[in-house]
Amino acid sequence: MTRKYVLHGAAPGHELKINYEAELNREQLEVVRGADGKSLVLAGAGSGKTRTLIYRVLYLLEQGVKPDQILLVTFTNKAAGEMRGRMEKHLGGSMQGLWCGTFHHIGNRILRQHAAAMGLSPGFGILDEEDSRTLIKACYAALPFKPTDLRFPQASVVRGALSFAANTQKTLRQILDERYPYFSHLEDGFRAIAADYERRKRESNNLDFDDLLLTWVRLLREHPEVGGHLSEQFRYCLVDEYQDINPLQNTVMELLSKRHGNLLVVGDDAQSIYSFRGAEVQNILDFPKRHEQVKIFKLQTNYRSTPEILALANGSIRNNLRQFTKDLVSVRDSQKLPELIKVRDLRDQSTFVAQRILELIDEGVELKQIAVLFRARYQAAELEMELSRRQIPYVLRGGVRFFEQAHIKDVLAYLKILENPKDAVAWSRALTLYPGIGPGIAEKLHAEYLGLFDGSDLVAGQARLVSAAFGAKANKRARAGIEDFKNVIRKISDPKDAAHPDLLIQKILDAGYSREVLARFDNAKDRIEDLKELANFAHTYKSLSSFLTDLALKENFRGESFAGQDDGKAKPEPDDQLILSTIHQAKGLEWKVVFVLGLADGQFPHHQSKSDERALEEERRLFYVAVTRSQDELYLIHPMTRYDREAGLVISRPSPFVEELPSHVYEGVEAMEEEAPRPSWKRDSQERDADDDEIISIDEF
């Protein structure tokens, strides 16, 4: 018998009638009808978890539960809006009263209602990330030393450390040791800033994003009457993407669901990939251990991918030891096997991807239905160049294009100064990296240099630049920065190095820019890795001039049209662009065709994960997320060689995640240029004289 529920706020006389058996599969139906008490829903990729959550809420309403007794927590405002909209469409009326939103959104609502209990006024302000950094920077006055004396990190780094400690509920000491060991000796400085930051927020009646959760937890714990009231109000608590919550968020939900015990968490441990943000996979793995009589449901019916793609995904993730076992089953018809593409190097990887994309377009696939995924940002640098050469329009999801990133442009500024001393923009960018030097001083210094440089002898001009007299008229603080700048120029001014842009980049890093990255960026390790790969990329160029020219021409391209599109074919729509994305940014999305770059040992998984089983399992989950983004076609690409400035040309084995796959779940393919010249790594070898096909065979690695 179908129950009926008259929704509060719906049109008069409107009755809700939902045929759950017709709308849901058996697995989803079990959750919707039976997820009372503590319930864990293990929702595999593409299994309809959002649909299941929506129908669970609708089912509760049909059972007579009032909208304001339901709390549905999502991870993005977009997800919350989508769920609310779909529910209202089903109901034909507003979802007035339902508590649906992100942790921070819900926390803000509750704290507005109970601000006085926490010593706040109801009109308290919320600092966004930029506001927070600005306020922390003002707190540097509280330091017991001059920040420049000990090269104290910038406000973004301090904010990152304090935020990570708050969300993981660890001590500042632990966070410094684990994530910022190069600043462990400055713990007293971090603590002084943290204390002054808290004082300034209180005095200005402001909270930052972390405070919305921290203060919420304090409210629940320190004011039992409020905590009891909220726990009584929320009869049913539901959490989406539970595998991604951090310990602080988990504490919030445990406290709110204490009274009625109805806590439904939906997630997939196989897609837990955000530990760098503070997410803890143990939250979902240990859920049955923390609670008695937990109901466990599994959504394993996949509506996205072909059976062949799922066979590969299942074959990979089952190698993780810490997991809930499950096997995704496709409802789709069988199609082609995923392909493991063996290419000679990064150049051939980019050539293959670009060529195959053009073929797919000819086959009728829209560009926006194709994605190229990679573990690290730098892995797409070579591909970006190739796409630009072929004028294939693309968009980078969730970030800035590789060569447009701040740290890349900083290093390129030094190189541009060498190549063109009159480049005022490059001078300003490089000089203003140093304490005490603003745009005004930078402009004066550039004018001073041009007065020394007659334009005919670049070497003589550089010698005058690094002389003791240059910049002597600047103030004391600026002079210290000028000396550091001159030291970098001195180290990169050897004319012989102009033929080796990779060496110049390394010298810039060694001369102090690596320390600048550590002090400036919260994700410093990733950015230094980017810069090392920039040097590897520059190795293929025989002059600084050709390197900078190629980059300039590349940056001038904005992807408006295809190459050779004067043949009468229609140009792509403005929104029809190839998608480039890190795997982290791609989670939750899907495309008809997916390419996964850089599946070589030491690149994916990250080389630092090999000695840490937990980190290695997260890397495998990252690979799993990548392959399950694909609907129809999947290409895994293994570059068999790569250049490394320290080791030279390196032969790369396939990723362990590829080697451990059953051989029947993919097809191996070699992508080689026709009549390709003998690769340099073969020419230089004294030990190998076999033909090309024998040498590049994957079997010998």
Image (spheres, rainbow, N blue to C red):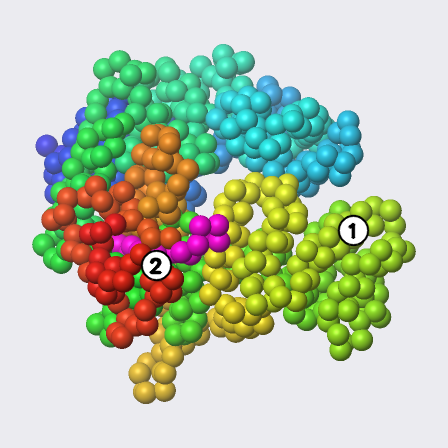
The residue shown at (44%, 14%) is 228
Q: Main secondary structure of the magenta part?
A: strand
Q: In which quadrant is the N terminus drawn?
A: top left
Dot 2 or dot 1, earlier in sequence? 1
Say whether residue 199 is left or right of residue 219: right
Q: Position of residue 420 (x, y in %)?
A: 68, 71
Relative vertical location of residue 152 with respect to residue 121 in this rendering, above or below: below
The residue shown at (38%, 71%) is 392
Q: Quadrant of residue 145?
A: top right
Q: Position of residue 692 (x, y in %)?
A: 25, 65
Q: Position of residue 323 (x, y in %)?
A: 25, 29
Q: Amino acid at mark 2?
A: Gln
Q: Position of residue 489 (x, y in %)?
A: 71, 58
Say whether residue 234 is left or right of residue 538: left
Q: Residues within 10 Å of mark 2 (few under 14, many from 20)?
A: few
Question: Which region shows up in magenta?
Answer: 631-649
Question: Circle 1 is placed at which residue position?
Answer: 483
Q: Is residue 639 located in the magenta-colored stretch of the structure?
A: yes
- Return the residue found at the far front: 686
Q: Nearer the viewer, mark 2 or mark 1?
A: 2
Say what secondary structure mark 2 lies in: loop
The residue shown at (24%, 62%) is 690
Q: CA distance from mark 2 to mark 1?
A: 46 Å
Q: Quadrant of residue 459?
A: bottom right
Q: Quadrant of residue 617?
A: top left
Q: Is residue 633 located in the magenta-colored stretch of the structure?
A: yes
Q: Amino acid at mark 1?
A: Glu
The residue shown at (60%, 33%) is 182
- In the drawing, what numbered circle is on residue 143? none
Question: Circle 2 is placed at which residue position?
Answer: 686
Residue 187 visible at all: yes
